[in-house]
Image (cartoon, rainbow, N blue to C red):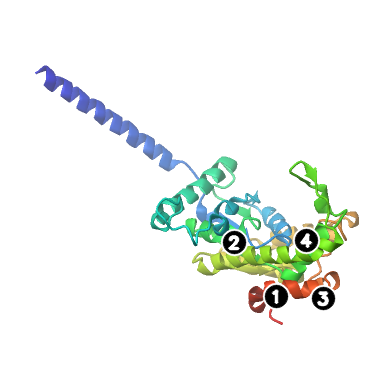
């Protein structure tokens, strides 16, 4: 008799616990979280106008900016050697892809919910991620409902811009690197720098392009050259392809606010972060040998994106 009473009490206790857990689950499910479908990732490479683009987008009503989270670099397939490591002990083993893709997804969404607890409930979060573009394929596979912008610029102009940024006295030297100031780029090292920069462009934009082609959700291809030539028209087209409503009058105001002409003269020019905003300037900035290096390395992307 006593055992039966105890058993009934244990059953009742378990039932109460189940009720509490179910209530807690409903509470968690009812909380407002970031809608992954309202995230817009900007992939490509540095010095492609991504800062300009994201500042315009961030000024639109209902938009927030996640400025260079670098989360894509965590999932650099080359660094992880994912094409070679296929054993079941590897943390990203192919046979467990469903599991670790969910983990990547949770990592990103948890970070966003912590960083933007209110602003992203009903609005849009623009993730500026050119530096992490090498990991774009995995990020977009983990968040297939997210939207994506592939932002590209002629690689010759990109390399020329980076080359200027790393010459002695340029803006990049003002940034501290591991506690020490950048030494600057000597003349004899410029060709090596050009080669390495072109290779980095090929990897970042190449991976971003693969993610773009595989993505089945909303996406837009934006060329810097088109953005400079017709900023309002290019943004209108991109927003239409992304499926995001935008007020044209507000868009015009934002574009005017961030126009090249509004940047103070002392903040523009050689060695400055805002250099020249001139498509095709690479013809003046690179030597014939440097042009040949860039064209040889980035040939696959040049042929498709910037055919002669």
Q: Position of residue 103 (x, y in %)?
A: 46, 48
Q: Is residue 45 left or right of residue 41?
A: right
Q: Which residue is mark 1?
A: 296
Task: Kindly report the distance in space between the C-alpha atoms of the residues bearing marks 1 and 4.
Answer: 18 Å
Q: Position of residue 128 (x, y in %)?
A: 65, 55
For mark 4, give the secondary structure: helix
Task: Kindly report the distance in space between the C-alpha atoms of the residues bearing marks 4 and 3.
Answer: 17 Å
Instruction: Categorize mark 3 by other alpha carbons within 10 Å: few (<14), some (14-19), many (20+).
Output: few
Instruction: Categorize mark 4 by other alpha carbons within 10 Å: few (<14), some (14-19), many (20+).
Output: some
For mark 2, give the secondary structure: loop
Q: Which residue is mark 3?
A: 288
For mark 3, give the secondary structure: helix
Query: For residue 33, which numbered disc appears in the image?
Result: none
Q: Is residue 171 left or right of residue 232?
A: right
Q: Is residue 267 left or right of residue 205?
A: right
**Pointer 4 and pointer 2: residues touching (CB < 8 Å)?**
no
Q: Residue at x 41, y 37 (%)?
A: 27
Mark toward the start of the polypeptide (4 vs 3): 4
Q: Which residue is mark 4?
A: 162
Farthest bottom residue in view: 308
Q: Nearer the viewer, mark 1 or mark 4?
A: 1
Mark toward the start of the polypeptide (1 vs 4): 4
Farthest front residue in view: 188
Q: Is residue 300 visible?
A: yes
Residue 33 sits above or below residue 10 on the image:
below
Mark toward the start of the polypeptide (3 vs 2): 2
Query: For residue 245, which numbered disc appears in the image?
Result: 2
Mark toward the start of the polypeptide (1 vs 3): 3
Instruction: Categorize mark 2 by other alpha carbons within 10 Å: few (<14), some (14-19), many (20+).
Output: few
Task: Kindly report the distance in space between the C-alpha atoms of the residues bearing marks 2 and 1.
Answer: 41 Å
């Amino acid at each position: 008799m006593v055992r039966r009473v105890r058993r009934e009490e244990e059953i009742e206790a378990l039932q109460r616990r189940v009720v509490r857990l179910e209530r807690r689950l409903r509470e968690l499910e009812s909380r407002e979280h970031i809608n992954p479908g309202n995230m817009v990732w900007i992939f490509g490479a540095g010095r492609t106008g991504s800062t300009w683009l994201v500042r315009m987008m961030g000024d639109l009503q209902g938009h927030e900016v996640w400025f260079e989270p670098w989360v894509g670099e965590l999932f650099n397939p080359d660094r992880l050697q994912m094409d070679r490591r296929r054993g079941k002990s590897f943390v990203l083993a192919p046979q467990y892809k469903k599991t670790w893709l969910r983990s990547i997804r949770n990592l990103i969404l948890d970070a966003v919910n912590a960083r933007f607890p209110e602003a992203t409930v009903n609005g849009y979060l623009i993730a500026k991620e050119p530096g992490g573009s090498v990991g774009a394929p995995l990020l977009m596979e983990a968040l297939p409902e997210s939207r994506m912008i592939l932002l590209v610029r002629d690689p010759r102009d990109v390399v020329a811009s980076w080359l200027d940024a790393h010459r002695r006295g340029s803006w990049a030297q003002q940034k501290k690197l591991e506690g020490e100031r950048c030494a600057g780029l000597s003349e004899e090292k410029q060709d090596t720098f050009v080669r390495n920069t072109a290779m980095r462009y090929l990897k970042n934009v190449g991976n971003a392009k693969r993610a773009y082609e595989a993505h089945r959700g909303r996406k837009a291809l934006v060329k810097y050259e088109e953005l400079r030539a017709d900023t309002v028209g290019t943004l209108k087209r991109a927003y239409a392809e992304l499926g995001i409503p935008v007020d044209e009058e507000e868009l015009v105001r934002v574009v005017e606010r961030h126009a090249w002409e509004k940047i103070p003269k002392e903040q523009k020019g050689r060695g400055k972060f805002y250099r020249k905003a001139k498509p095709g300037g690479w013809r003046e900035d690179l030597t014939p040998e440097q042009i040949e290096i860039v064209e040889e390395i980035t040939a696959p992307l040049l042929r498709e994106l910037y055919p002669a």
